[in-house]
Image (cartoon, helix red, strand yellow):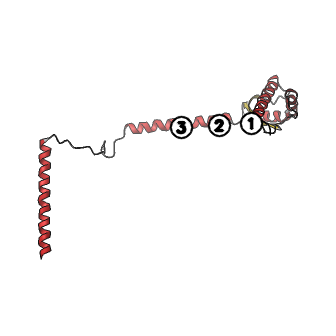
Amino acid sequence: MADPARARKMADRIKEIVAKRLDKGLRDPRLGFVTITDVRVTGDLQHASIFYTVYGSEEERRDSALALQAATGMLRSEVGRNITARLTPSLEFILDAIPENAEHIEALLREARTRDAETSMLASGAAYAGDADPYVKPRDLDDDEDEAARSDELDELDDEASDLADDAEAGGSR
């Protein structure tokens, strides 16, 4: 297995060679506007996967794929002449799905933004189901009236408690 740094350098070099050759042009009229996006070389430097995108319709993508497949031998020869390796790696062209994935992600983000806007519109007119502040707060003991009312309530509770205690004693002695 080769050094990963060496494999990366070879991938960069292959990308450059193939891109320059495609820029010069192939004699195949089916080849559309092709951009090489990435190249990955296996650890043993025997195989290179070349990722590309094509600007245009689905038919132009299909035609460009056929043109690249037909030109694979010529492009491999070009790579072999321009790299310093004992063996020339085999080439495989793979249509890169980055533009489609990016469009899908953008559509999802647009949908999320519209849902967020709808939610904020609904939230602006919403009211609390209960109290606006449901947490219990300490009472103010500064008001004399409140304190007197509480004192009266406590006296009544004491009276009721003593009545219940008396009834319990009377019932227990029978």
Q: Amino acid at mark 3?
A: Glu
Residue 52 placement, left or right of 86: left
Instruction: Determine if residue 51 is in view.
Output: no
Q: Secondary structure at mark 1?
A: strand
Left or right of 110 on screen, residue 166: left
Relative vertical location of residue 62 with respect to residue 167 in this rendering, above or below: above
The x and y percentages for residue 48 are 80, 36
Residue pictured at 11% horizontal, 59% vertical: 159
The quadrant of the rendering that contains the C terminus is: bottom left
Q: Residue at x 14, y 69 (%)?
A: 168
Q: CA distance from mark 1 to mark 2?
A: 12 Å
Looking at marks 3 and 1 on the same chain, the residue that comes earlier in the sequence is marked by 1
Q: Amino acid at mark 2?
A: Asn
**Is residue 157 shown to the viewer in this render?**
yes
Residue that numbered label 1 is attached to: 95
Q: Which label sits in the foreground, 3 or 2?
A: 2
Answer few, some or many: residues within 10 Å of disc 2's Cα (few below 14, many 20 plus, some between 14 and 19): few
Q: Amino acid at mark 1?
A: Leu
Q: Which residue is mark 2?
A: 101
Residue behind mark 3 = 111
Residue projecting furthest to the top: 24
Which mark is first along the chain, 2 or 1?
1
Residue 164: x, y in percent? 14, 65
